[in-house]
Amino acid sequence: MKPGRRVLVLVCAVVVASIASGPFLPPWALFLITVSIAKGLVALGLLLLIRTGLVSFGQGLYFAIGGYAAGTAAQWLGVGDAVVMVAIGVLLSAVAAAALGILLARYRTIFFAMLSLAFSMILYGLLVKSSALGSTDGFNVAPSTVAGVKAGQFGYPVFLLTVGSAAFSCVLLDAYLRSHLGRLAPAVRDNELRVEYMGASVRNIVHLNLVIAAALAGLGGGLAALTVGHVDPEMAYWTTSGEFVFITILSGTASVLAPFLGALLLELLRSLAYEHAPNTWQLIMGGAMLLVILFLPSGLWSIFERRRRIA
């Protein structure tokens, strides 16, 4: 089976399984899975950046823009439908990346990482000082409908919206990675000079990938805000951006489905560790990360890749 078709089949299988099992899941499981998928969308954008040779410690910037845009659309514009709220967040995140990318696309390695982190922390500072946006407390977000359907008590319509958004994003990004522009991403990472000799603009490729990654982060931020029902400045804090990098390293970059597996396992591990070892849960998380780096340097998805090659 062709790789692109295999991804499509896997995505369809996951969507069908999610729709079928969703009504029978307890509220805590539904919440955990929905938040994991939302964070997986941010990591999906990081996958694209890492394939381009870039590591961003500032994806919390676009994550926060997506969440706050969804919330302010409801409070200030009277928008009550979750689809429209999330769409506004995606649009504003992409616009912000298009503007900031003019500067960011010029830098590489640690300079890119630190500059992206700086922009994220600037937003964090602005949100903390903004009383209109709730300052350090943030504010609540509650959609009244999801694509015209009344939001359910346990968030099942938001869960379906999140699953559908993730599936659509996976298929689109997989198609992009197999396109001419998408195949240039690893080439930019390996040798920018040769890419320029081929007639392609490295800066334009990096800029485009930044916008795509930001749009995915904004999508994840908007969905996370609707799921949690609240936004606060911590969405833009450096620890949030670091968590997205953690997820991407944990899952690997071999498949567009990998970030969602990594995000789900991370949330499960954190929940279990916090429940059974509330005073040392960070130690458990760090130990798990160390084990993955030592024994699975290409991420958890490399297990499936090895099995597929053997088969």
Image (cartoon, rainbow, N blue to C red):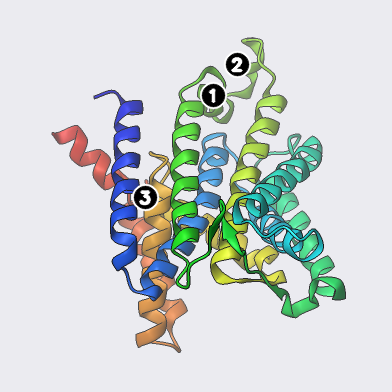
User: Which residue is outermost to the top?
Assistant: 198
At label 1, the amino acid type is Ala
Inspect this view and state whether residue 290 appears. no
Say which amino acid is labelled 2.
Arg
Q: Quadrant of residue 264?
A: bottom left
Look at 62% across and 38% down and name the residue there: 212
Report the side of 132 relative to 164 (left or right).
right
Q: Amino acid at mark 3?
A: Gly
Up the image or down, 181 lies above or below 129; here it is: above
- Circle 1/circle 2 CB separation < 8 Å: yes
Q: Which mark is residue 194?
A: 2
- Identify the element where label 3 is drawn: loop
68 over 115 or under it: above or below: below
The x, y position of residue 98, in whole percent, is 76, 38
Which quadrant would residue 128 be assigned to in this image? Answer: bottom right
Q: Is residue 249 visible?
A: yes
Q: Position of residue 231 (x, y in %)?
A: 67, 70
Instruction: First in sequence, mark 1 or 3: give its number.
Output: 1
From the image, state whether disc 1 or disc 2 is nearer to you: 1
Residue assigned mark 3: 299
Q: Report which quarter residue 202 is drawn in.
A: top right
Side of 256 where 76 appears, left or right: right
Residue at x 55% of width, y 28% of height: 185
Choose mark 2 or mark 3, whichever is in front: 3
Reading the image, the residue beneath label 1 is 187
- The N terminus sits in image quarter: top left
Identify the secondary structure beneath mark 1: helix
